[in-house]
Image: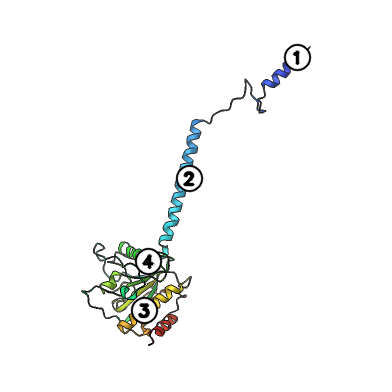
Amino acid sequence: MKVLPQFIDGLRKGLTTSRGVPAIGGPYTPREAKPYLRSWVLLGSGLLAFALVLALYAAYAGTALDPAAAALDLAPIELPGSAVAALPPSPPTYALPKALAYDADVTPRDWTSVVVHHSASTRGGARAFDEYHRKVKGWESLGYHFVVGNGSDTPAGAIEAGPRWRRQDRGAHAHSAEYNAHGIGVCLVGNFEETRPGEPQFQATVSLIAELCRRFRIPPERIYGHRDVREGAATLCPGKFLPMDDLRAAVARELQP
């Protein structure tokens, strides 16, 4: 009669592993993952990593030059020039005599006004805008004469002179033949429909324009915002947070003896 209990006890031990996992047919042996399953896991991980890299690149590209900068309020008033012959913008500088220098073999142009712009982008600089104007617009070079940095691509308040200034060429910034030919284009990096220019950038702009007015005998009342001179469709440039009356008043104070 002891045979039956021993049989039942042996059957129970044989059907259960030391971990409590049924092991019908013998001791429990862990099963390896199927090879094709491992391949799918590796492939999925690779695709996920690739998608993450693309997302990071797209995010960086979006901040490198905002879509708003790709829609800079400029008109192709001039015929496309040769990008190969274009000179790069000068390095940024705070020294106005250096920023205002032009090529020795050119005659100063008859400048009669200053036209102020914002870039409508959160970042940028003369080199980035120059590349956009040449490669996308098909222009000879940067449409502005000067670009004043906001601390993104160049230091806040850094003044960059474009090739058009050094050659004393007409601008491509005003949507107006008169103000392109005789208006000095000054662009502040930033979107001043959304934020105000920083103090270093604003003060550098005041000093730059005051010196231009002094050298070319331009009265402060002939300092315009782009919206004041643009022909055709209206523009908000240089933005509601860059009041032109305040800028003209600041320049007038700096011009006082």
Element type at marker 3? helix
How many badges with numbers are in the image? 4
Q: On the image, numbered disc 4 is attached to which residue?
A: 125
Q: Quadrant of the C terminus?
A: bottom left
Between marks 1 and 4 in the image, the one whose residue lies nearer the viewer: 4
Q: On the image, numbered disc 3 is attached to which residue?
A: 209
Q: Is residue 126 above or below residue 257?
A: above
Between marks 3 and 2 in the image, the one whose residue lies nearer the viewer: 3
Q: On the image, numbered disc 1 is attached to which residue?
A: 4
Mark 3 or 2, nearer chain start: 2
Q: Are marks 2 and 1 in contact (CB under 8 Å)?
A: no
Please give the name of the residue rendered at 43% of the width and 84% of the height, measured from the top-left corner: 249
Mark 2, residues whose alpha carbon is within 10 Å: few (<14), some, or many (≥20)? Answer: few
User: x and y percent of residue 185 in the render?
Assistant: 34, 75
Mark 3 or 4, nearer chain start: 4
Between marks 2 and 4 in the image, the one whose residue lies nearer the viewer: 4
Q: Amino acid at mark 4?
A: Gly
Element type at marker 4? loop
User: x and y percent of residue 182 in the render?
Assistant: 29, 79
Q: CA distance from mark 3 to mark 2?
A: 52 Å
User: x and y percent of residue 109 in the render?
Assistant: 26, 78
In depth, the one of 117 and 105 nearer the eye is: 105
Q: CA distance from mark 2 to mark 4?
A: 35 Å
Residue 227 seen anywhere in this rendered image of the structure: no
Mark 2 or 1, nearer chain start: 1
Element type at marker 1? helix
Would you say 182 lies left or right of 226 here?
left
Would you say 68 lies left or right of 8 here?
left
Q: Amino acid at mark 2?
A: Leu
Q: On the image, numbered disc 2 is attached to which residue?
A: 48
